[in-house]
Image (cartoon, rainbow, N blue to C red):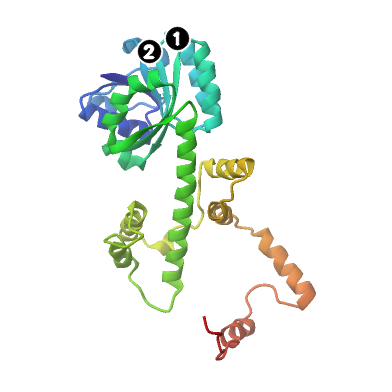
């Protein structure tokens, strides 16, 4: 079995290495030289025409490049040179609507297009990924042996027609952001609470038998071992899929408050100027004479304002 990969960044290169170890012939191309991949057996082509020449028909070519116009540009170049029956597989995080459009456009040229949501991060690409695949049955069946070989056991699913793979991956990312936000908020409570806690030990404990055990909890333990949380910038970057999630929920009128809030918190992490909070401070100053910035007297009032309240029975 053989296949090609356009885009040998972190995901593409790790998948290539895994495939070589599993006995596949891999032909790849990238804008940057990748001599380390050539050393382990990946055949490197100088460009897309060179990659096409090195593959046998029907060709299976994966795209592992950032979502956006570049995907269309590469598909256009491929369609000019591929033969009928060849297969293009977009393994990136493209919008599912773009994947539907690209399927139709490729179909006109007699070339198959498959959308393949890929999860598992760099570790998954290297040792076994999770694939969510959308596309017509014929090309999916041809690509299935490769995808199943590169996936963890039970980590491959044909989700349905074109676009469905990337749609499922989009919802996967929505769930991911909600989980990240919950774990982040829990970390804040542990840090700011009344106890001097060993966060690394706690996340290790949670990874063993707790209801919330999982890979993200394991990764948090790993990160706490490697770096001081106090030295990590609070700015959280992303590639834009979170915006698509909110737009999709609005379009189909499905309430997703947890996901929506996690997206808003993501934006808050980037707002160094915090104009919203400045505006609130200005209005509070206007109607109540509240000060600008920290005030020791008000802080003390906040701490001692509640003396010994009587709570109603639950």
- Please give the residue where the numbered disc 2 appears in the rendered image: 52
Residue closest to the eye, 256 or 222: 256
Q: In the rendered view, does 200 fall on the left or right side of 7? A: left
262 left or right of 298 in image: left
Q: Is residue 70 visible?
A: no
Q: Tell me what residue is drawn at x 33 percent, y 58 percent.
A: 213
Label 2, residues with CA under 10 Å away: few <14, some 14-19, many ≥20:
many
Query: Going by the image, does 65 lie left or right of 280?
Result: left
Q: Position of residue 5 (x, y in %)?
A: 36, 24
In the rendered image, which quarter is residue 90 located in? Answer: top left
Q: Which residue is mark 1?
A: 81
Residue sitting at x 69%, y 73%: 292
Within-10-Å neighbours for mark 1: few <14, some 14–19, many 20+:
few
Q: Is residue 288 above or below residue 253?
A: below
Quarter of the image for residue 113 reads top left
Q: Earlier in the sequence, mark 1 or mark 2?
A: 2
Q: Are marks 1 and 2 in contact (CB under 8 Å)?
A: yes
Q: Residue at x 56, y 91 (%)?
A: 307
């Amino acid at each position: 079995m053989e296949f090609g990969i356009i885009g040998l960044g972190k995901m593409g290169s790790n998948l290539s290495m895994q495939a070589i170890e599993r006995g596949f012939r891999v032909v790849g191309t990238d804008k940057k030289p990748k001599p380390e991949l050539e050393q382990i057996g990946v055949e490197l082509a100088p460009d897309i025409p060179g990659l096409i020449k090195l593959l046998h028909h029907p060709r299976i070519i994966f795209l592992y490049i950032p979502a956006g116009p570049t995907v269309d540009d590469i598909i256009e170049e491929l369609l000019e040179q591929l033969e009928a029956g060849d297969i293009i597989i977009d393994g990136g995080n493209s919008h599912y609507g773009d994947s539907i459009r690209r399927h139709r456009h490729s179909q006109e040229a007699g070339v198959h297009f498959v959308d393949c949501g890929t999860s598992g991060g760099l570790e998954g690409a290297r040792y076994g990924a999770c694939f969510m695949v959308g596309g017509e049955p014929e090309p999916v069946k041809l690509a299935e042996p490769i995808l199943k070989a590169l996936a963890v056991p039970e980590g491959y699913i044909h989700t349905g027609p074109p676009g469905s793979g990337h749609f499922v991956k989009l919802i996967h990312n929505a769930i991911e952001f909600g989980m990240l936000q919950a774990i982040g908020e829990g970390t804040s409570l542990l840090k700011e609470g009344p106890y001097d806690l060993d966060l690394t030990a706690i996340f290790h404990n949670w990874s063993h038998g707790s209801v919330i055990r999982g890979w993200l909890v394991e990764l948090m333990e790993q990160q706490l071992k490697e770096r001081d949380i106090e030295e990590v910038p609070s700015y959280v970057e992303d590639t834009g899929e979170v915006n698509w999630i909110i737009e999709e929920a609005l379009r189909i009128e499905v309430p997703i408050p947890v996901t929506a809030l996690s997206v808003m918190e993501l934006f808050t992490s980037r707002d160094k100027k915090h104009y919203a909070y400045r505006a609130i401070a200005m209005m509070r100053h206007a109607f109540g004479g509240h000060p600008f910035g920290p005030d020791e007297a008000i802080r003390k009032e906040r701490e001692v304002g509640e003396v010994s309240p009587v709570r109603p029975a639950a």
